[in-house]
Amino acid sequence: MNKRDFLSLLDFSPEELEYLIRRGKQFRKMHAAGEVYQPLVGKTGIIILQMASTRTRVAFEAGMNQLGGHAIFLGTSDSQLGRGEPIADFARVVSEMVDIVMIRTASQEDIEELARHASIPIINAMSSRLHPCQLLADIQTFEELRGPIKGATVAFVGDGYNMCHSFINAARQWGFNLKMACPEGYQPDPQILQSTNNAQMVDSPGEAVAGADLVVTDVWSSMGHEGQEVDRKAIFAPYQVNESLLDRAADDALFMHCLPAHRGEEISETLFDDPRSVVWHEAGNRLHSQKALMEFLLLGPVDA
């Protein structure tokens, strides 16, 4: 089997992404039933997190263990990368020792360099440019609760950063319609935006959310925006997602957030208590979708 990487949703075909969603749904059912399934016995993965993580680390580490493999965590000070070892050298070394690497770091270019020099699969566990693993969980959640997302309308409100970029890629791959409302100066990368006809900028959060089947937001100050919090709060204040904004969406609309959230900022204090919010289901699906991804990269499609 040829080595594959998952650095962006665009690395996989729409058919492969649909397979991952189906497999993630199966893993959720197997987990709920207490079924033990360990196809990765003897496999080892490294989790490199150069930025903080809760859901990503827990999902990958628990997922690898549940599949019978072993996970090694490396923080910023736990490897020679933190002391200046060239990425190419690191990639060649770990390729001799383990089977798969999941990395979260600010630079998408560093992740791509790691993938170029590694002979084992590399997973982008988030960069400042993209967050593809989160989208697997988001699409799985929507389809479990509402059916196929193809042709649906999705609203993204907030910062045109990594989550917004990956939603643009997702609109291209799954064929849904994405409407985005972002403040001037905080809009998504034009090159990413122009890669699909399925995504468009609109003038206001209300216009984005009107009639939407899914409403999504993210924090106003992500990792890499340290020191900008005060200025960003003032700029993004009109972009808070609250119950009254959500009322403009379709009657059966869902609300998602990749977490962690700042209540009272990008969302109202009580939005997570709204029955339209599915953030806990969404967070749980990080485990199941990432198990599907690891299995696919190490074993290929599984008939199940």
Image: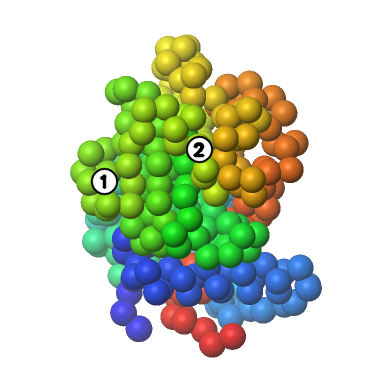
Three-letter residue code for mark 1: Ile
| Residue 16 in view here | yes
Quadrant where the C terminus is found in the figure: bottom right
Q: Residue at x 52, y 43 (%)?
A: 211
On the image, numbered disc 2 is attached to which residue?
A: 210
Question: Alpha-carbon distance for marks 2 and 1?
Answer: 24 Å
Three-letter residue code for mark 2: Ala
Disc assigned to residue 192: 1
Q: Is residue 16 left or right of residue 200?
A: right
Q: Residue at x 63, y 21 (%)?
A: 264
Q: Residue at x 67, y 43 (%)?
A: 277
Q: In the rendered view, would you say 180 is above or below 147?
A: above
Q: Residues within 10 Å of mark 2 (few under 14, many from 20)?
A: some
Return the residue found at the far bottom: 303
What is the tally of numbered marks visible in this picture? 2
> Helix or strand or loop: what does disc 1 sit on?
helix
Q: Say which of 243 and 29 sits in front.
A: 243
Picture coordinates of residue 234, whole percent (x, y): 46, 12
| Residue 69 in view here | no
Picture coordinates of residue 32, whole percent (x, y): 76, 68
Q: Earlier in the sequence, mark 2 or mark 1?
A: 1
> Helix or strand or loop: what does disc 2 sit on?
loop
Q: Is residue 246 left or right of residue 128?
A: right
Residues at badges 2 and 1 in contact (C-beta under 8 Å)?
Answer: no
